[in-house]
Image (spheres, rainbow, N blue to C red):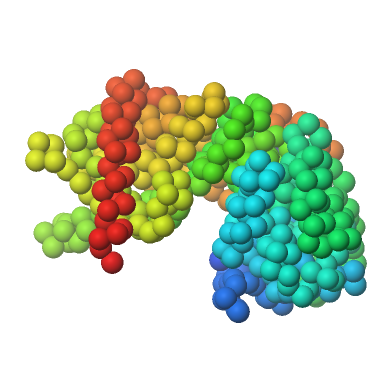
Amino acid sequence: MTQTQQIDVAAAIAAGETSLGIELGSTRIKACLVGPDHQPIATGSHAWENQFVDRLWTYSIDAIWEGVQASVADLLAQVEEAYGVRPTSVGALGVSAMMHGYLAFSADDELLVPFRTWRNTNTERAAAELTEVLGFNFPLRWSASHVYEAILEEEAHVSELAFITTLAGYVHWRLTGRKVLGVGDASGMFPIDPATRDYDADMLARFQGLVAARRPGLDVASLLPEVLVAGADAGTLTAEGAALLDPTGTLQAGALVAPPEGDAGTGMIATNAVAPRTGNISAGTSIFAMVVLEKPLESVHEELDIVTTPAGDLVAMVHCNNGASELGTWAGVFTEFAAAMGVQGGSDAVFEALFRAALEGEADGGGLLAYNYLSGEPITGLAEGRPLFVRTPGSRLNLANFMRTQLYGAFGTLSLGMKVLHNEGVELDSMFAHGGMFRTAGVAQRLLAAAIGAPVTVGDTASEGGAWGMAVLAEFRRTGGGDLSSYLNERVFADAAVDVATPDAGDVAGYAAWLEQYEAGLAIERAATEAIH
């Protein structure tokens, strides 16, 4: 994410040749300021937590603004301490946030019910009906599912409903006065037509028919924010907006503002995965893959969410509830054992040794199976999880096979979802992987390449996360836009240091044999959830 020329950071700050990205995540609000070279100048952050109120997950409006102001104040202080100048303006800014959910407003711009986040699952009836009638997979967390559920439940506030938006859309609206959304965030509200980069007109008409039968006179199209692609004019920071960001009055109005985006979109930016046939995989507590499509899929698949890049290209998302947590638990057991033997070195050294051992394992795992299901897994139809390690008397249990199998187990459900894409004819040129399990160079990366049958890239380009990705989108807006993929390749990531692992033929064949057994063994996992409480 570098450019060859050196940037005078203090001069860029004083001249307002900077861009600010703010991302509201589920546990942290982060602000990141970049210069014309896209390098982070400073970051600020604020921790926050959702509340469970009246059986719904929410954040209060006060908490939203307290968090935004705290993260910006932290950033401004960091800049002043490092460079001796406190910014009075930025060239551009942008807001991103966790996607989906439901913020509902009246014609007088009053919030009608507390913010309902993506985490709420009270929308099963609406999501199922929308999926069936519209022929498109509507997840429970999508904004359309939330608004239709409110209509089905005949909630009192629906009679006053005039506008709905996402968290990023709400913050942007208050900063600029514009009721707009970036296309990536909008794609988590309602399906997008890749030809128009706008809400799918046919589906919107059919949705209107469903709504009209229950709530005559409610125009669903008028409820939704205007859709904008990356680089488009999404307004400027107003005086009121500047006061919301910085109540001290130091930060002035006038900055260009980028279309607000979702955290999926900023993740794509941070990993340079916006071109067709590319994607990214994030491995943490959960694990998910985003694959940019060349064309719409032929069929509807419950395993896949269809969203878009910030430029409006279709993206298939494979989301698995269970990621690297079980792997970390086993590493903890081995760390305890090492300590009991008097071996010093800590968890990092243990992870390194265990991961290196996995490379010595048999390509098919030696007949061992591992299931990382700490919670339920929708892709495999399991409402609950039971972590399992399974082997036959004839399997070959040793450290190398055990660890290779544990790594395979972290990727198992993901590769089942990716297999759906493969069967649809989707091809991949590269995937960018990020997460703690890729810190040991060349191990999880190599095995993931075998699991998905595509080259896997690892680097430090995603280290600043979504707030940096949003700052890049703001800088893209400040410098005039254009083709987003070309901009990232030529101006943001041209000098990025990355490592690429291509699939090894032996690993690919071994993993395929292991995955066949893994699928068959899901019956064991299902039986365990029924038998063990």
Q: Residue furthest left?
A: 393
On-image quarter of the C terminus: bottom left
Q: Nearer the viewer, residue 2 or 94?
A: 94
Above or below, 423 against 532 in this view is above
Residue 177 quadrant:
bottom right
Front one among 413 and 158? 158
Residue 270 visible from this viewpoint: no
Which residue: 51% across, 43% down?
Answer: 303
The x, y position of residue 510, in whole percent, is 28, 27
**Residue 395 in sight in this render:** yes
Q: Position of residue 97 (x, y in %)?
A: 67, 58
Residue under the image location 39 percent in, 25 percent down = 503
In the displayed structure, would residue 296 be above or below residue 285? above
Task: Name the foreground residue: 273 vs 248.
Answer: 273
Instruction: Note whether 198 is above or below 87 in the view shown.
Output: above
**x, y percent for residue 492:** 67, 36
State the residue at coordinates (24%, 42%): 369
The residue most toward the top is 505
Residue 343, image quadrant: bottom left
Image location of residue 30, percent across then percent down: 63, 61
